[in-house]
C-alpha cells in the first residue's frame, strides 16, 4: 500500500525483548510488502553460525566501529550486553529519499536516540503475550544456556519500563496477525498530520494558488 501523500518514505524503529519474535516478524513483513527496507547495523560482536557479513550485520572491529562514531557516520549507537551496535546514517537517508519505509530493529537506548534526533520516527515495541511465553520461547530455542535465559529475562524486566515511550505495542501471539498489525500501524502512523507537515504545506499552497486563479478568471 503506497500513500499519495509524501513521496519520501518513513522511519520506524522496532524494539522488543529478545525472544519476542521481532526478527521473524521483520522477515515476513519484508517478504510480503515491497515498500519496506531493513537497515543493516554495524556491530562489534562476532557472527553467529549462519550469519552473513553485510546481510545480518556489518561485523566490525572495535577500532573500525570507533572510527564510524568519530566520523559521525552513525545515526545512533549503543552498547548491549558486551558489544556495540549502530545504525549507518547514509543508507537510511538514501532509502527514505527513495521512498522506502525504513525499519530499524534496535534496542531501547538506540530507539530513544533516534526519536530525539528525528521526532517523526515511529516507535513499535514487540512483546509476547506473557512473561511465561517469553521464557518458554527463550528456553525452547535450545541454543541458550539457563544463564543466558536468565540474563535475557532480566534485560526484559529493564526494557519493559521503556514501553511507555513507544507509539504502539505489537503483541506477537500469532505471526500473520502480528505482521499485518505492524504493516497497518506503520501505514496509519506515517500519515498523522504531524508527520505530513510538508505534504500539508504543499496542499495549502496549491489551494491558495487555485483560489487566486479562480478569483482572477
Ligand atoms: P543481537 O546480538 O541478538 O543480534 O542483538 C542484540 C540487540 O541489539 C537486539 O535487541 C537488537 O535489536 C539490538 N541492535 C541490533 N542492531 C542495533 C543497532 O544498530 N543499534 C542499536 N541501538 N541496537 C541494535
Image (tube, rainbow, N blue to C red):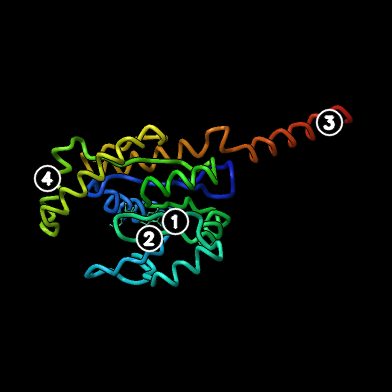
Label 1, label 4: how far apart the Cα atoms are: 30 Å
Cβ(mark 3) to ligand 1 < 8 Å?
Answer: no
Q: Within 10 angstroms of label 1, few (less than 14), some, or many (20 or more) residues? A: many
- Callout in the foreground (3, 1): 1
Cβ(mark 4) to ligand 1 < 8 Å?
Answer: no
- Callout in the foreground (2, 4): 2
Kind of element beneath mark 1: strand
Image quadrant occupied by the C terminus: top right
89 in relation to 121, above or below: below
- Residue at (24, 67) in percent of width and height: 48
Q: In the image, 145: left or right of 72?
A: left
- Callout in the foreground (1, 4): 1
Kind of element beneath mark 4: helix
Q: Position of residue 54 (x, y in %)?
A: 38, 70
Q: Position of residue 145 (x, y in %)?
A: 11, 57
- Callout in the foreground (2, 3): 2
Label 2, label 1: how far apart the Cα atoms are: 7 Å
Mark 3 or mark 4, which is nearer the start of the sequence? 4
Q: In the image, 62: left or right of 129?
A: right
Q: Which residue is mark 4?
A: 136
Q: Which residue is mark 1?
A: 77
Q: Within 10 angstroms of label 3, few (less than 14), some, or many (20 or more) residues? A: few
- Residue at (50, 66) in percent of width and height: 68
205 in relation to 93, above or below: above
Mark 1 or mark 3, which is nearer the start of the sequence? 1
Mark 1 or mark 2, which is nearer the start of the sequence? 1
Q: Which residue is mark 2?
A: 84
Mark 4 or mark 2, which is nearer the start of the sequence? 2
Label 4, label 3: how far apart the Cα atoms are: 65 Å
Q: Nearer the viewer, residue 35 or 25?
A: 25
Q: Which residue is mark 3?
A: 212
CB contact under 8 Å: marks 2 and 1: yes
Amino acid at each position: 500500500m503506497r500513500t499519495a501523500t509524501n513521496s519520501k518514505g518513513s522511519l520506524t524503529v522496532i524494539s522488543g525483548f529478545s525472544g519476542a519474535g521481532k526478527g521473524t516478524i521483520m522477515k515476513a513483513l519484508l517478504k510480503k510488502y515491497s515498500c519496506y527496507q531493513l537497515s543493516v547495523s554495524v556491530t562489534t560482536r562476532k557472527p553467529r553460525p549462519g550469519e552473513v557479513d553485510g546481510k545480518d550485520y556489518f561485523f566490525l572491529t572495535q577500532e573500525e566501529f570507533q572510527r564510524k562514531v568519530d566520523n559521525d557516520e552513525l545515526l545512533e549507537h549503543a552498547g548491549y550486553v558486551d558489544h556495540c551496535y549502530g545504525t549507518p546514517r547514509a543508507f537510511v537517508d538514501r532509502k527514505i529519499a527513495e521512498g522506502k519505509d525504513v525499519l530499524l530493529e534496535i534496542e531501547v537506548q538506540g530507539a530513544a536516540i533516534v526519536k530525539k534526533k528525528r521526532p517523526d520516527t515511529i516507535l513499535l515495541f514487540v512483546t509476547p503475550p506473557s512473561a511465561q511465553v517469553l521464557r518458554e520461547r527463550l528456553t525452547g530455542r535450545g541454543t541458550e544456556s539457563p544463564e543466558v535465559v536468565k540474563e535475557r529475562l532480566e534485560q526484559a524486566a529493564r526494557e519493559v519500563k521503556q514501553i511507555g515511550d513507544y507509539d504502539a505495542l505489537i503483541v506477537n501471539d500469532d505471526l500473520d496477525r502480528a505482521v499485518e498489525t505492524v504493516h497497518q500501524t506503520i501505514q496509519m502512523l506515517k500519515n498523522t498530520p504531524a508527520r505530513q507537515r510538508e505534504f500539508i504545506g504543499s496542499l495549502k499552497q496549491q489551494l491558495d494558488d487555485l483560489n487566486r486563479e479562480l478569483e482572477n478568471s
